[in-house]
Image (cartoon, coloured by chain):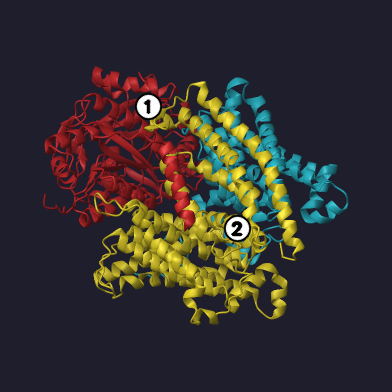
Amino acid sequence: MSAETTSTPIATVRAPGLLRRHWPWLAAIAIALLLPWLFFDWTKGRHSGFVLTMLSEIGLMSVFALSFNMLMGQTGLLSFGHAILFGLGGYCTAHALNAVKAGTLWLPVELVPLVGGLGGLVFGAAFGYVVTKQRATAFAMITMGLGELVAACALMFMGFFGGEGGIPTDRMVGTSLVGVDYSSSWQVYCLIVAWVAIATVLMRLQTQTPLGRMANAQRDNFERTQFVGYDPRMIRFYQFTLSGFFAGIGGALYVLVYEIVTFDTVAAAKSATALLATYIGGAGSFLGPFLGTVVVVLLQSGVSLISNAWLLYVGGLFIVMVMFAPGGIMGIVARHEPIARIGRLGELVVPYARILPPGLLSVLGFVTLVELAQLTTIGAAQNKSLAIGGQAIDPHSALPWATGAVMLIGGGLWLRREARVFRVRWDALIEEAKARGLPV
Amino acid sequence: MEVFLVSLLNGLVYGMLLFMLASGLTLILSMMGVLNFAHASAYMLGAYFAFTLSQHIGFWPALVIAPLLCGLLGAAIEMYGLRRVHRNGHIAELLFTFGLALIIEKVVQMTWGLLPVPYRVPAGLDFPLFSIYGTHFPAYRAFMLLISLLMFGAIWLGLTRTRIGLVIQAALTHPDMVGALGHNVPRVFTIVFAAGTALAGLAGVIGGNYQVTEPAMAFTMGPIVFVVVVFGGLGSLTGCFIASLLMGLIQTFAVVLDYSPADLLKQFGVTVTSATPFHEVLTVPLPRIGALLPFLLLVLILVFKPRGLMGTRDT
Amino acid sequence: MLKTILARLALAALATASIGPAFAQGTIKIAYTDPLSGPFAQVGDANLKQMNYILDYINSKGGALGKKFELVPFDNKSQPSDALIALKSATDQNMPFIMQCSGSNIAAALIDGVNKHNARNPDNRIIYINCGAVATELTNEQCSFWHYRFDAHAAEKAAVMVQALPKDVAKVYLLNQDYLFGQSVQRDVKTFLAKLRPDVQVVGDELIPLGKVKDFAPYVTKIKASGAQALLTGNWGPDMNLLIKAGIDAGVDLRYYTMYAHLAGGAVAIGPGGDGKVYSVQAFNENIAPEIGNAEAEAWTKEFRAKFPFDFYAAGFRTIFEFLAAGINKAGSADPTKVAYALEDLKIKDFLGFEIRMRKDDHQIIGPYFVGIFKKGVKYDSEKTGLGWATAATVQAKDIEQPTTCKMQRPKS
């Protein structure tokens, strides 16, 4: 699935076999639209607002992460300040929506994300002119400095940023093209899905344009790109500006979901989220950031409801990922490709099934210990209690600690043994694939 | 004159505190290329270790032991974590340290609680050393200045006068060549990372009681350290030293110079009123943005001079 | 997308294995959202501990309409978007109240979010209880029928600060954080100084970027040079602690008037050097009860000291829950619209014996306020430092109350 290995010519997009070739995209949209119904509250006859907002958050953050990957994955530029484009796009959108509400501007709600995109594009060009002078670490550090400056300005200057309270807005401006008032989260969610799909397809197509290809080239070999006759700086500039456009669309979707934009949208934490999502999903493949966003948002908004120690789990996950799966989730999937090509994926089922229990056991042991530790020190008075299967557990007795430690250590040792077995099987299959002349 | 002298002293002390933090990071970043986000976490750990140790064995032993503990931790992190991640590229290393910073923050919260701890300046140093125009200069500030100067001297001597220092220096500019000459580059990496972490720990021991020892101290100190290191330029301890002092002095003097761009424009006969476009930005006085100047300077210097102030290598 | 479902299932499984809030049936649920993780977790954590202590007491007295209150915490990580997600969760579960204390950015987002939610879902409304976001705008321009503020706002705190300024102070220096709250403290303090203390001269007026200054020594030098006798600041967190520490270290003869020095962690951060120099505008301190001879209140807060390593400072929270209980009893149900009407103009005596009123015009709490001085030799010290807060001034409700520009829109009940 990676951008480099797939070489779908643009022409096929318009070919009659659209449905046949691109069914995964359509299936993804269908699933996105069906998923909220799983959580529909039939007794009250309404959608779960929490689930819809979280899915919308996944959608808008994945547009943001994908735009971030236009820099990191495709152009090899690590940005620590990408959120400024996301946030500024959001501020432009909020001002535009307020103008529509006041009647000084006419714009259908459905096209409002374009305003965010254009805002991101303009600011992307302005900042891009400065930052793309450099690459590598210098680029990363300039974006970090710029990010801090913009975030500080957002608090200081009232006129455009609205200060600490931000710019509140209202998405019910009554200018819909399809006659929807966007009062419910469900209506907004449908709009989000549509725009996420449009933005994703556009970004996908962009990877196949000459600019997208040259961005890859200057990432892989900066000097040779110059010999081919392209100015690497201009490539970086166009790529940065375009990614600003898509980040701005993400920011606009944020405004539509939350109906407010505050300085948090330009702050470093948002930039970090995109970086983490992209890496976890896999920067090397187009859809990696999307998967990464799903994981990160679920951790942020889901696990944080259950445990205050969620940041520790996030930290642990990153460390495990960078140590054992540097290609991210999509990297793990891609590694199975040669084995799948020789048709022997089935032989991995048993080894996988064997490492699953010790893996789960050690994770469970780790979680138990962390939760116990944090319950004794901070969590106790936060109305949280530890219970397994309705059975309350006393963190001051020795038994749960011992159980946790045994699970962690025992599980770890068992995992090591099973991992060795797995490794043998895996290497044999890879050798097999190599022998058949497949690239590994 | 009064304000000038006091500000100069203040700027020096603050600059030297920055240098204590930044010197470790400049070694790590120049040599290993690791954007170590956990560096400020080591600073925090140093302060917390010193707090606990000083309750039992006093401040002076803690001054030695806490940085050593941080150094050991750094060595372990390098040997069992970073070395493994190294082959996966710089972004992997960066995220590794980022994950580490999150974990350290949470572990500190779980061990020492969420509130600040009463880590105090030792009684032996808690007196005003001298008074200058009625403003006390605390002895502890002089002590900080002394420690950081000693540190600068020790690092400089270590790098230029010892065998391992020469190897490290060589590895700063030509890592591959050093490896080719048969030096154990991974071990050098471990030493550098451990030393860098220990220096951050020392800065924590010194800075923790001067400022406030709390779980957010790593988070708030993080960005400015990067600014100093990158501004000074990779591979140059002197650059780092100058950058630290410069940042300290600039921020200190920005506070006393009460001017805004509008005042500058007035010199050219342009008067800024509330009707002027961008008047909100133009009337901002210098003290209001003093603490942001380092970031502005960082952006400016990198745009025109990607190697930083005295860098020997491209960043 | 399969991943989503899998992750979701895993999450659900984890949730039923249950490391989570212990839900009980038939309780009145109050969603509470503040930072509970990350670098600023202490804010939410300290609040939560005090709230649970208060709720245990109120529930033991019978709660409201025979039902117990239950607090359901949501971590918002200081992000407005996460606070809005918490709002969605609360309304999904038909909770009648959502409470938030820290950050006017989040408060603004919540007021707006609650307004829209209640307008769009008349059958599932929710009341927003503001327990500490103090931007003056929230009960003026942005005021809402669904928003009740149970803390004095920035302008009121500024008024208290100015009224507590001793007569011998002639020169003051203002230093504030450069964002909405700090700027409004700066503006309001100057307004009240001009009105109430025309003899006082403002010799310096400074704004600093929020959380960016690591060394306050240069500011102290400047303050010293200006000849100020008192420093008036709305700073909180490191911006306040480091400022006071730097001032004490430099031995400047200065009195520090703050708004947040009495919060959890403040006493430890300032340390013994602050003896007799630091003042804080506060709704409560542990020595008020013995000072006014209220033994019952004293015993009640003493019990909190025995359990937790910091002071009880949140008398305002107790007022909140007593208001809610009284409001629900008066309305005869926990229906948000009825309770919202019942709370308007409600008066109760708080546990110290002062009369507290919820003003109908803008839903702003009106009650007395105190200025504490941090010093040695008080009955109850703070956080085992040996120093504690003694009352330096009590400002009556009538001297705090200020006109509002709010034009309240009320729904049909």
Quick one: which chain is cyan? B
Q: Nearer the viewer, residue C288 or A178?
A: A178
**Residue at the image point whose x is 63% and y is 38% from the top:** B203
Q: Position of residue B159 (x, y in %)?
A: 79, 45
Is A238 left, or right, of A385 in this rendering?
right
Q: Quadrant of the N terminus of chain A?
A: bottom right
Task: Give the colour of chain C.
Answer: red
**Residue at the image point whose x is 22% and y is 33% from the top:** C368
Is C165 left, or right, of C18 in this rendering?
left
Residue carrying label 1: C311
Res B140 visible? yes
Q: Quadrant of residue A276?
A: bottom right
Is A172 left, or right, of A190 in this rendering?
left
Res C215 visible? no
**Residue at the image point whose x is 41% and y is 61% from the top:** A32
Q: Quadrant of residue A88?
A: bottom left
Are there few (<14), some (14-19), or many (20+) residues within 10 Å of tag 1?
A: many
Q: Quadrant of the C terminus of chain A?
A: bottom right
Instruction: State the SS at label 1.
Output: loop
Q: Amino acid at mark 2?
A: Val
Mark 1 and mark 2, same subunit?
no
Quick one: which chain is yellow? A
Instruction: State the SS at label 2.
Output: helix
Q: Position of residue C350 (x, y in %)?
A: 20, 29
Q: CA distance from mark 1 to mark 2?
A: 54 Å
Residue carrying label 2: A333
Q: Are marks 1 and 2 in contact (CB under 8 Å)?
A: no
Q: Position of residue A128 (x, y in %)?
A: 54, 69
Relative vertical location of residue A66 with respect to residue B84 in this rendering, above or below: below
Chain letter of disc 1?
A: C
